[in-house]
Image: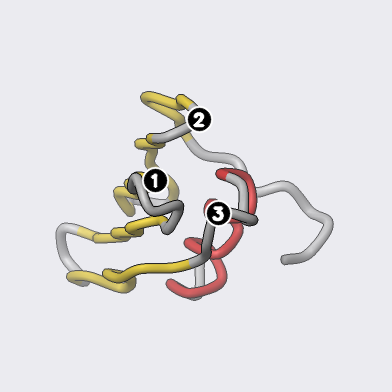
Amino acid sequence: MSKKRRMGRVVKKTPKHVVGYYQGHSIEIQREPDGQFYIMVTHPAKGTSYDGWWGSEVNGMDEAIQEAFRGSKL
């Protein structure tokens, strides 16, 4: 991810769950008990751009957020 910070609206952020919006996309990330993250990025008009599992117990929520942007090409 570039050093430029992406701005959006975070609705909820805990160590295990993030919900937010960026450029009309809804971003939701949930950390599962096994340490992996379930990432879903959707747009009402464009559909789903990321829907899947990522990472492991060594990855943190900030890294999962970066992956959501990378993987959905935002």
- Gap between marks 3 and 1 measured at Cα: 9 Å
**Residue beneath disc 2:** 15
Closer to viewer: mark 2 or mark 3: 3
Locate the N terminus by quadrant.
bottom right
Alpha carbon of mark 1 to alpha carbon of mark 2: how far?
8 Å
* Tag 2 near tag 3, CB within 8 Å: no
| Quarter location, residue 44 | bottom left
- Dots 1 and 2: beta carbons under 8 Å? yes
Q: Is residue 36 above or below residue 5?
A: below
The chosen color scheme is secondary structure
| Residue at disc 3, secondary structure | loop
Mark 3, mark 1: which one is toward the viewer?
A: 3
- Mark 3 or mark 1: which comes first in sequence? 1
Tell me the residue at 46%/25% (across/down): 14
- Residue at position x 35%, y 36% from top? 19
Q: Residues within 10 Å of mark 3 (few under 14, many from 20)?
A: few
Residue bearing the label numbered 1: 31
* Amino acid type at mark 2: Pro
From the top left corner, tell me how far across and down residue 23 is, in percent: 42, 52
**Mark 1 nearby-residue class (10 Å; few <14, some 14–19, many ≥20):** many
The residue that label 3 is drawn on is 57
Coordinates of residue 41 in the picture (x, y in percent): 32, 60
Q: Please determine whether, in this image, residue 6 is positioned above or below residue 43.
A: above
Q: Is residue 65 above or below residue 70?
A: above
Q: Which mark is residue 9?
A: none
Quadrant in the picture for residue 30: top left
Instruction: Find numbered disc 2 in the image and state the secondary structure of the residue it sits on.
Output: loop
Residue displayed at 34% across by 45% down? 33
In this rendering, is residue 57 above or below 62?
below
Disc 2 versus disc 3: distance between alpha carbons? 12 Å
